[in-house]
Amino acid sequence: MGSSASSGNGIEVFGATNVHIINGTVTGFTGMSGLLLGPGSSGTRVEAMTLTGNGQGLIINNSSGNTISSSDISANLFDGILTNFADDNNFQGNRVVGNSGVGYDLFLSSSNNVISSSKISSSVIAGNQAEGVLISENSDNNTVRSSQVLNNSLNGVDVYPGVTGTRVLSNTVNGNGSGIVLRSGATGNTVKSNTAKNNTDFDMEDDNGPTCDTNVWLHNNFNTANEPCIH
């Protein structure tokens, strides 16, 4: 499978279930995205795809229960992966590198998603020009696990105000603006067993004061933090 053009989306899935998209390259769709999973779609499996040189690499919009695995989503003009109203998706072992926006942008009520390692390789989220992982806008109960979040221009993992139930577990988060950040008003989140080193500002940052509100920081390996409640 190969596809290249300048406008529109490279591949679109609307109103379909259990579609399997495997082992192809989509490039040059600079006006939109390489791949769009749209309203009415669910259960799509995207495996071993290369989405590069597009506007957005992958957009999941009003679509849930999809699996994106072992794919290279790199060097796109905006975000690598952007979700809107997208729940219960699994992102396993992807390489999301060198995008001009955010690596993984879980935006606008995208909940219960998992970004994790896989049996093939760990997720690599690196060298993006904004955040590595950004969780915002009523996107609750997401998990970032066993991933390498490296050398992103802004923060490695950034959890925005009002977001709750995030689990950041067993990741390596090095060389970013700040490493792992819980913004003021982001409460009820758990950050555990991560290594965060050599980040420009803080390796670990909680903007909810010296008690970290109801956030839990445990068994992390880091050099710098902004509050004493971070462990």
Image (cartoon, rainbow, N blue to C red):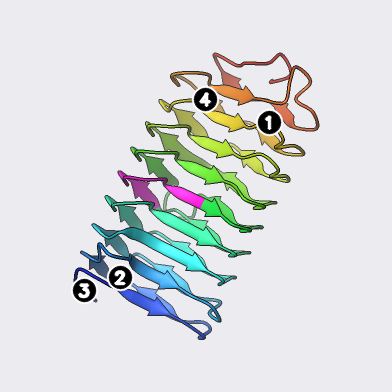
Q: Which residue type carries mark 2?
A: Asn
- Find the distance from the CA under tag 3 to the CA under tag 1: 44 Å
Q: Do we see residue 109 in this rendering? A: yes
Q: Which residue type carries mark 3?
A: Gly
Residue located beneath label 3 in the image? 2
CB atoms of marks 4 and 3 within 8 Å = no
CB atoms of marks 1 and 2 within 8 Å = no
Relative to 34, say whether 171 is above or below. above
Front position among marks 4 and 1: 1
N-terminal label among 1 and 2: 2
Residue located beneath label 4 in the image? 196
N-terminal label among 3 and 2: 3
Q: What residue is at 66 percent from the left and 34 percent from the top?
A: 191
Point out residue 184 in the picture as x, y percentages from the top left corner.
68, 31
N-terminal label among 3 and 1: 3
Which of the image's four quarters has the N terminus?
bottom left
Q: What residue is at 41 percent from the left and 71 percent from the top?
A: 36
- Find the distance from the CA under tag 1 to the CA under tag 2: 42 Å
CB atoms of marks 3 and 1 within 8 Å = no
Of 93 and 14, the residue lying toward us? 14
Relative to 162, say whether 141 is above or below. below
Numbered circle sitting on residue 184: 1
**Span colored in magenta:** 95-105
Q: Which residue type carries mark 1?
A: Ser
Front position among marks 3 and 2: 3
Considering every residue shown, the one lying at the far bottom of the view is 16
